[in-house]
Amino acid sequence: MANGQCKLKDRHRVCRNIVPVGIAATALIAVLWASLAAAHILPGPFVLELMAQKLSGAQSRRVEQVVVIEDPLVSEDPIELAEELSFLLPGRFRSEILFQDSRRIHVFSQGDSVTIVDDRIVPDSQGRFDQYKDVLLYQSRNMLHKALLYRGVDVGIVSLGRMGDNLVYVIGAQYPDESASQLWVDKERLLPLRWIDVAPKAPSGSAPDRLDFIYSDWRQIDGAWYPMQIESWLNQQRIRTIHATSVETNVVIPGELMNVAYLLSLYKTPDLPEPEAQRPEDAVDEVDQAIEDFKKKFEP
């Protein structure tokens, strides 16, 4: 019995010696992995350069997609919209959405934009939900850099992180910090997988408003990569999912469809009352109210 107890004690003694060594070895491996990973972190502008090259397989693109709005504040049941996108790369974009008997056109061209609802020009309504297109719209590092800086992403900060099974470059934050605006780029494929947009200001005592775009089901079509699904999450609640149903590359797109000045001359603006005749309670007339009602149907 004594020998058995001795052996048991000896065994515990050995275990007491081994456990700290095991912990130390694990910690050492973690440090070495972190050091090795840090050595392979590319600068943010260079990651953008490689990403732009990966997305530059087409000069033009036409996409047909279904937009499913799942925001309970808009409707108790999901709403499906048919949308057609046109890209003239780099930097020109047109969206045309059909909903029941209404049509919304939004055109963005080299910094200028116009929004048309039911053949009438309305105050430009490009919002945060439209910005998902930005990482798909530019084919140069400089343009991508400017677009991200405009959205609050500090391109000078880069770290490595994980998204599912993918190792990613996190541009704009130190992983796993998600309190700042940031872009996640697949380290192997160099395709954008996630864009976190954090509003710069929040009401006192509340968490900042955060919008996440998740790009998935990337497919190479005629040599050009495109995500067939894009999800929008607002404060960790999914509110919109885009399913691309058709993608054509290097198609002919008439230039006037992307010409903001031409569209401004072609369509009408709502007739508003003269300022001196307008009472404060009449600030929104019937035309504007109809436009707002339509916009609320598909813009949370």
Image (cartoon, rainbow, N blue to C red):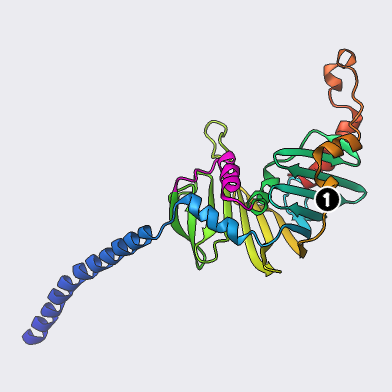
Residue placed most toward the observer, 4 or 215:
215
Q: Which residue is mark 1?
A: 97
Residue placed most toward the observer, 286 or 126:
126
Residue 216 screen position, x and y as percent: 63, 63
The reply to whether residue 193 is in sight is: no
Q: Which residues are magenta?
A: 139-157
Q: Give the side of residue 123 with respect to residue 19, left or right.
A: right
Q: Give the side of residue 10 with respect to residue 75, left or right.
A: left
Q: Residue at x 12, y 74 (%)?
A: 13
The amino acid sitting under disc 1 is: Ile
Q: Give the side of residue 107 with respect to residue 30, left or right.
A: right
Q: Residue at x 65, y 51 (%)?
A: 138
The N terminus appears in which quarter of the rendering? Answer: bottom left
Local packing at callout 1 (Cα closer than 10 Å; few below 14, some 14-19, many 20+) is: some
Residue extending furthest toward the left? 2
Residue placed most toward the observer, 279 or 114:
114
